[in-house]
Image (tube, coloured by chain):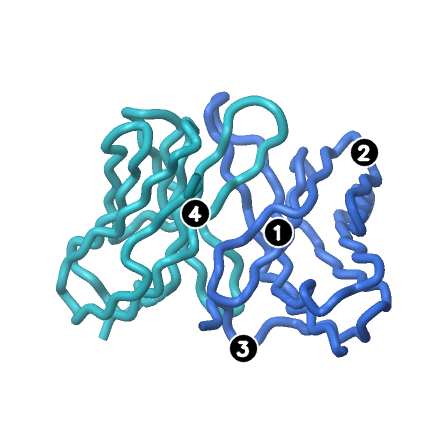
């Protein structure tokens, strides 16, 4: 069943439209950002990432934009399909203690609903 | 190639009971993590293990213990479960070098009554 609760912001789009999911991050020192997709009853899956020395990165049907001035991250999905329906999380990597730590801080997520 | 495997998928406990959540990965990753996911919140890190033989606290470690049994396995133990520990728990592993991506298991839905 659903692993994420009922109070997520929801974006509803028509199949074939482009989707834009936004995320505000908290730490200006964060140097690495990732978008994850979580389908119902499953763990999050990696979609795309971007380092802080970039402002745009493109993948297959997805683009991530980073605006460090306002600490904002967005995920654009082109030609949205029903299979894109899921909860999307952004995550930031805050430089931590020592060299071994790689622990991401996740946002609360946005639910994307694709209408056929 | 199963990736990250968690057991059990579902569990119901009474307050005060103990249990261990199991996690194993077959990708030869060094780092492993335990997260919890609660309604309206992102995943929060409970404990992590940067390499075999080491463990460290994350954001919300109270009420939990972990064991990195070997490179493959990282278990999470609740010694005396409380209703506040009702959550979905995810184990993840991270490869070394290259792009940093966490690979997640499918989760354990835990209810503490």
The answer for which chain carries disc 4 is: B
Task: Identify the residue position indicated by label 3 in the image.
Answer: A6
Of callouts 2 and 3, the N-terminal one:
3
Q: Residue at x 22, y 49 (%)?
A: B77
Marks 4, 3 in one chain:
no
Check disc 4 and report the residue beneath it. Answer: B45
The residue that disc 2 covers is A54
Q: Residue at x 51, y 33 (%)?
A: A102
Q: Mark 2 and mark 3, same subunit?
A: yes
The residue carrying pointer 4 sits among few (fewer than 14), some (14 to 19) or many (20 or more) residues within 10 Å by Cα, namely: many
Dot in front, 1 or 3: 1
Above or below: residue B33 compared with residue B29: below
Q: Residues within 10 Å of mark 3 (few under 14, many from 20)?
A: few
- Rendered residue at 32%/28% (across/down): B71
Spatial CA distance of label 1 from label 3 is 19 Å
Give the mark nearest the N terminus, 2 or 1.
1
Q: Disc 4 and disc 3: Cα gap in Å?
A: 21 Å
Which numbered disc, 2 or 1, marks the residue closer to the eye?
A: 1
Real-space Cα distance between discs 1 and 4?
A: 16 Å
Q: Report the residue that reaches farthest toward the front.
A: B1
Q: Which chain carries label 1?
A: A
């Amino acid at each position: 069943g659903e692993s994420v609760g009922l109070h997520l912001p929801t974006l509803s789009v028509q199949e074939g439209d482009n989707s834009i999911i936004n995320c505000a991050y908290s730490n200006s020192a964060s140097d690495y950002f990732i978008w994850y997709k979580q389908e119902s009853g499953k763990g999050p899956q990696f979609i795309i990432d971007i380092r802080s020395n970039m402002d745009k990165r493109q993948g297959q049907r997805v683009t991530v934009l980073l605006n460090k001035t306002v600490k904002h991250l967005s995920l654009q999905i082109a030609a949205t399909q029903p299979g894109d329906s899921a909860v999307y999380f952004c995550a930031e990597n805050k430089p931590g203690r020592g060299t071994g730590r790689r622990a991401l801080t996740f946002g609360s997520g946005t639910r994307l609903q694709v209408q056929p | 190639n199963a990736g990250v495997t968690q057991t059990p998928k579902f569990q119901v406990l009474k307050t005060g009971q103990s249990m261990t959540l199991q996690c194993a990965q077959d990708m030869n990753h060094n780092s492993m993590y335990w997260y919890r996911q609660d309604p309206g919140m992102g995943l929060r890190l409970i404990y992590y293990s940067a390499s075999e033989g080491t463990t460290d606290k994350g954001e919300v470690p109270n009420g939990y213990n972990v064991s990195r049994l070997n490179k493959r396995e990282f278990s999470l133990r609740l010694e005396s479960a409380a209703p506040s520990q009702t959550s979905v728990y995810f184990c993840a592993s991270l490869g070394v070098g290259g792009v940093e991506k966490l690979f997640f298991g499918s989760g354990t839905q835990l209810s503490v009554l």
